[in-house]
Amino acid sequence: MYKEPASFKLDIESGVIEDSKRLVRRLSDMKGYFVDEEAWKELVEKENPVVYEVYAVEQEEREGDLNFATTILYPGKVGKEFFFTKGHFHAKPDRAEVYVALKGRGGMLLQTPEGEARWIPMEPGTIIYVPPYWAHRTVNTGREPFIFLAIYPADAGHDYGTIAKKGFSKIVIEEDGEVKVINNPRW
Ligand code: M6P
Ligand code: ZN
C-alpha cells in the first residue's frame, strides 16, 4: 500500500550514488552526435573514452512518483566541440525536470520542438528548472569532471530520436581558448 521511505548516500566528490543503477556511455555509443565526424572516428579508434556515467535511482513509471540521477560528464572534446550528454525530450513531453550542479563547470543546452535554443552556464550551486517540452543536454566546458544531480518524474521517459537525428540548433565549442556557443552548421 505505502512505499517505504528511503535515503541514499551520494559521494559529493565522485558523484556516485550507492545502490543505484550505473550506466556508462562511451564515445562509440554517440555515433553521429558530434559535428566533426573524422575527429569522432579517430578518437573512438584511439581510446574510445567514457564520455559520461549516470547513477540512477528509478521507480516504476507511475504518475506522481520521482526518479533521480547523478551524471559524471568527463572533460574532453571531439574536434572543437566539448563532450556532452546525448540529450533528450521526455517521452511524455510535458514533464519537467530540475538539475543541481555539484562539481566542475559546464552548462545546459535547452531546445523547444521548433528548434529555439537556450544556453545556461552551470557551476556548483546552479539549479536549473527545465520546463515541460524543452529538450535538454549538458556540456562539460571545464577541465575536470562535471557532476550534477537531476530529479525528474518517474513517468517522464526519454525520447532520444529527434536529437539523435538533428542534434541541437547550437553547439558549444572551444575557439581561441574561449567557450563559444555557435549555430550548429549541420542544423
Ligand atoms: C540526467 C537525467 C537523466 C539522463 C542523464 C543523461 O541525469 O536527465 O534522465 O539520462 O542526465 O542524459 P541523457 O539521457 O540525455 O544521455
Ligand atoms: Zn530529462
Image (spheres, grey):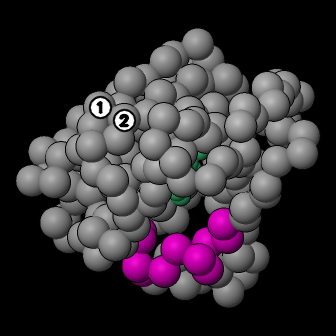
- Residue for point 59% across, 24% down: 101
Residue type, numbered disc 2: Ala
Q: Residue 131 shows which numbered tag?
A: 1
The numbered disc on residue 1 is none
Could you tell whether 172 is left or right of 127 in the image? left
Q: Secondary structure at mark 2?
A: loop
Disc number for residue 96: 2
Circle 2 residues within 10 Å: few <14, some 14–19, many ≥20: some
Q: Residue at x 39, y 67 (%)?
A: 160
| Quadrant housing residue 35 | bottom left
Quadrant occupied by the C terminus: bottom left
Are discs 1 and 2 less than 8 Å apart at CB? yes
Q: Residue drawn 67% across and 48% down? A: 58
Q: Is residue 128 left or right of residue 57?
A: left
Q: Is residue 101 above or below residue 35?
A: above
What are the residue bounds of the magenta stretch? 25-37
- Front-lying residue, 3 or 184: 3
Give x and y (percent) for residue 34: 41, 69
117 or 5: nearer the viewer: 5
Q: CA distance from mark 1 to mark 2?
A: 5 Å
Left or right placement of residue 84 versus residue 147 in this view: left
Residue closest to the eye, 27 or 90: 90
Q: Locate residue 166, reporting x and y percent.
A: 24, 70
The residue most toward the front is: 1
Which residue type carries mark 1?
Pro
Look at the numbered disc 1 and give the secondary structure of its residue.
Answer: loop
Q: Quadrant of residue 121?
A: top left
How many other residues sit within 10 Å of disc 1, few (<14), some (14-19) or many (≥20)? some
Residue 168 against residue 1 in the figure, above or below: below
- Residue 133 appears at what percent x and percent y? 24, 44
